[in-house]
Amino acid sequence: MSARLMANPQFRPTLGGRAPRDEMPAPPRAMAASAQKGNRRRAWPRWTRPAVKAALVLVPVLLLAGAAGSAWKRASLAETVAAARESVMDASGALGFTLNEILVVGRTETEREAVMEALGVRRGEPILAIDLAETKQRLEELPWVSGASVERRLPGILYISLSERQPMAIWQHDRQFTVIDRAGRPLADAVELARRGNQRIDTLPQVIGANAPQQVQSLLAALDRVPAIRPRVTSASWISDRRWNLQLDNGVTVKLPEGAGMPMALRQLAELEATGKVLDRDIVAIDLRQPERAVLQTNATAQLPGWEDESKKKPNGKKT
């Protein structure tokens, strides 16, 4: 009796009893990666991507349409542009781009109130509406500020970096004491800073004379080359609008020549101090106005304080 074998349409022959490649189970690592990928895909609803694309397209279109609609009611192009900008700023604020925090770095001498007044901003306003260039200019107009940078750190932080001028001397004039920098620019009232407890004021030398601030830069540059002398200078007087008299911490007055001879005279004084400790002697003044010559005045031959540049003669011919 013969038996008919029915072919199974889903039957697939195998080689050596092995299952075909497409029917082999996936390794566990691949299954875990596939599951994680599926979870990531299911983290956002399917409608999220189309909605975001539509928002990116529709928001600018609506803003422009609103601005164009208001243009028919405006009398000039400037008003139309201003209205469009205001609409964009209001829209950015509604999206969360508002000023929430102000970070200022580099501020040492500048008062916090002065910085806030120069900024002219308020918390909660659209951060995109802040004019960075104008804000930077107002900050650099502050006496202590030599440079400023202003950045937006979205969504709500205004980051400000300040560079401040360094106080170098106190200018005494008209019974006032003004802190100045190396270039002679006025920075602040020295008495007010001392009242607030600023300890740097006590370390600054004084400069005296109507035009002393304009000449202090060359004096400080010359003193920088003689580090042994500079710390001992307590004050400097600009004499006859031509030259300097230095007052040292031991009461000795040093008369410097005018013009290009001043740096050379200071080096000469530094050499005399290094070799002979001339500043430790019982003297009241050192005249360095003549090239390569130092005239030392002791207590016995000293003139009165504030002695003049040129000696005056009495009627009988004697010098004072």
Image (cartoon, rainbow, N blue to C red):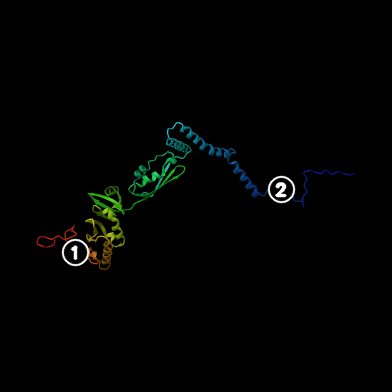
Provide residue 215's location: percent of width, then percent of height: 27, 55
The residue wearing badge 2 is 22
Q: For the view shown, which residue lies furthest in the right direction? A: 1
Taking 8 as reference, is 240 left or right? left
Which amino acid is tagged 2? Answer: Asp
For residue 105, the mark is: none
Task: Out of 74 and 262, give the one closest to the viewer.
Answer: 74
Q: Which residue is mark 1?
A: 297
Q: Which residue does the image show at 62% across and 43% down from the upper left?
A: 38
Residue closer to the observer: 139 or 102: 139
Percent from the top left, x then y, of residue 3?
Answer: 87, 44
- Quarter assignment of residue 291: bottom left
Asked if 263 appears above or below 12 in the picture, the reply is below
Residue at 72%, 49% (x, y): give it: 21
In the image, 222 versus 125, the foreground residue is 222
**What residue occupies the far front of the structure in this picture?**
76
Residue 10 percent location from the top left of the image: 77, 44
Could you tell me which quadrant the N terminus lies in? top right
Above or below, comparing residue 260 to residue 111 in the picture: below
